[in-house]
Amino acid sequence: MADPSSIIYGLETRARALSAQSANESESVRFLVGTQSFHGANEKGEDNQIHLVEYDEERNTTQRNIFTHSVGEVWHLAASPTNPLMFSTCYNKICGAKADMRATLWKLPFEDENQDLLDDSSIQDLVKLADLGTDQHGDIKCVMFSPSDEANELVTLGDMSFYLWDIDSGGKAEVKSQCALEVKGHPKFTSARWDPHHRCSQIATTNDCCIRGWDLRSMKQIYTIDNAHGQLVRDMDFNPNRQYIIATCGDDCRTKFWDLRSSDKPLKILDDHSHWVWSVRFNHFHDQLVLTASSDSRVVLNSVPSLSSEPYGKLVDDIDDEEGDGDLENNISSTRVEQVLPDSIVQVFEEHEDSVYSVEWSDSDPWVFASLSYDGRLVVNHVPRSEKYKILL
């Protein structure tokens, strides 16, 4: 049986912000996309937009709802992991001759999280819940929701500091604590990820070529990887099933894997791209599957079982009964070995024609992912069936 073909959803303007909507009761595969049209208007004079795109695997088609994002061009978008209707945007707000990066918490105008998408050309208004940045907070690079089901918290990342916020059930946000980056040279934060382990009490940030870990309880730095990459570190991700294992990528065209307990050198280096690597993501369920996206217009799917929670594919029965002793059971048990799966590139996806800034796994289907290039092309793809069966069988 052939693999499902790629689905391409085209926006009418540039875009770089992508996030997978958290799974709802219907387990629909949905992605949120934010446009980045200069001065807030596209070729038709419309405001920037948020597109909620749903993928129907049975029909291999997409449906959509479109929402107005009039406050500015979207640079970062994050969906709440616990509330499918809530998400945040970081956007460029023009104030006279000055452009400030701000963040806002939004709610989709749906009665419930399982509402069907209309798939029409009408544009709806979002429900604004709270502003997450003011002049005193400086520019906001990104927003991270806590992965914990018990804590309604988020972190906003600025140039030189980050803030921990509490969110109530109505979406009201209040700063709980803050921490500043105090190092020589005044480097700026570039990205951050929330560690899903350690009771969700830690985050990691990147600045220049460095990676830093922070404890949100004490707001103190707890580890550092200096010179993690030869050039700027663009993104990072935590292995969801193995503590201390992270992946990083950057302008040196490389993806590196690290053990935070012994970070003198990387565990593994991938040289799959010919230009800057903008995004790296572990599969939420099968952590040997790792996606990377680059401005070489390619998305690469790797299988790295050597660093995953599933390093062995299956048990192999090598039955050797040449001696003719008839003791088949003993021969099976004595020769049963674990077959170690090799690390390898599963597939290179080349449907894009511009820089690919974002790639995200679906939150409800472990075999589906989406990638977004700067020309506004969203591509929905699948893990090849051969690789899927290799993992499952």
Image: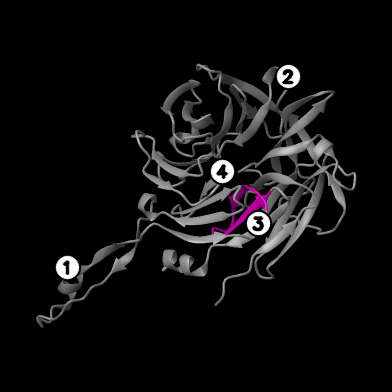
Please identify, in this view, whether the residue under mark 1 or under mark 4 is nearer the observer.
4
Amino acid of disc 1? Ser
Q: Is residue 212 above or below residue 147?
A: above
Local packing at callout 1 (Cα closer than 10 Å; few below 14, some 14-19, many 20+) is few
Q: Is residue 194 above or below residue 113?
A: above
Q: Residue at x 58, y 20 (%)?
A: 178
Give residue 334's mark: 1
For this view, does 165 lie left or right of residue 244? right
Q: Which residues are magenta?
A: 354-373
Q: Which residue is mark 2?
A: 135
Please identify, in this view, whether the residue under mark 2 or under mark 1 is nearer the observer.
2
State the CA–CA distance, disc 3 to disc 1: 51 Å
As drawn, the residue found furthest toward the right would be 45
The numbered mark, 2 or 1, whose residue comes first in the sequence reads 2
State the CA–CA distance, disc 4 to disc 3: 15 Å
Give residue 352's mark: 3
| Local SS, label 1 | helix
State the CA–CA distance, disc 3 to disc 2: 38 Å
Give residue 276's mark: 4
The numbered mark, 3 or 2, whose residue comes first in the sequence reads 2
